[in-house]
Amino acid sequence: MYEYIKGMITYISPYYVVIETQGVGYQIAVANPFAYSKYQEQQVKIYVYQVVREDAHTLYGFEILEEKQLFMKLISVSGIGPKSALAIMASADHAGLIQAIDATNVSYLTKFPGVGKKTAQQLILDLKGKLGEVGITGEPKEAMGTQLALHAEYEDVALNEALEALSALGYSEREIKKISKELAKEQLESTDAYLRHGLKLLMKK
């Protein structure tokens, strides 16, 4: 099992980042790929968790060890797979997530893609009072910029990237359309900023 990988970020997409080390490019699924744009073409250390299945070997990555530990707690819950865990963590308000679980706030938890009432209740049953040891504290991380272009639903490239990233996290086309016009009015400076704001809007719906 890998603990972390050190290397250079060479590619960022809505679904994953690629980190190259000793001539090998590792594809790593992360909650918010565009948050890594500040590291592009720089040496970086990413904590990783490997999931091995019959049809795929997937690496999931995290900026800090505490995020990896939270991810491992989430996937230990019945009904929460790695993709759902990443979508839950993408909001970056991990302290808010822990508070919602400890407060038995089912309505908050069911706003995440792939989390129904039954799964939310299982999250609470399994993790209530058990996430303090993870050490997640403080405010959500600050936004970072990116310069990648994928498609052009809107003229703003960063907005298009953010919408595609929301889709990659598992949000439905209907959910994304509900917030896309409101998001477009913001005129933010980076994909990461649009993505973070979009996640906040989705959590309010």
Image: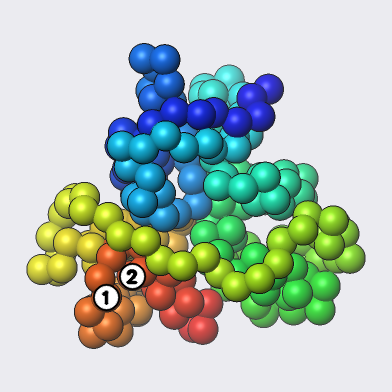
Q: Which residue is mark 1?
A: 188
In what element is the residue under mark 2?
helix
* Res. 13 in view: yes
Amino acid type for the residue under numbered disc 2: Tyr
- Residue 36 lies left or right of residue 118; in this view the side is left
**Going by the picture, which residue comes out furthest to the front?**
43
* Res. 195 in view: no
Of residues 38 and 125, the one nearer the viewer is: 38
Q: Position of residue 43 (x, y in %)?
A: 42, 34
Q: Residue at x 30, y 79 (%)?
A: 183
Q: Which residue is mark 2?
A: 194
Q: Residue at x 70, y 67 (%)?
A: 137
- Bin the neighbour count of mark 1 within 10 Å (Cα to Cα): few under 14, some 14-19, many 20 and up: some
**Residue contact between numbered discs 2 and 1, judged by CB atoms under 8 Å:** yes
User: Could you say which disc has been placed on residue 78 in the image?
Assistant: none
Of residues 125 and 130, the one nearer the viewer is: 130
- Residue 93 lies left or right of residue 1; in this view the side is left
| On-image quarter of the N terminus | top right
84 relative to 122, above or below: above
Q: Position of residue 134 (x, y in %)?
A: 78, 55
167 relative to 75, above or below: below
52 relative to 23, above or below: below
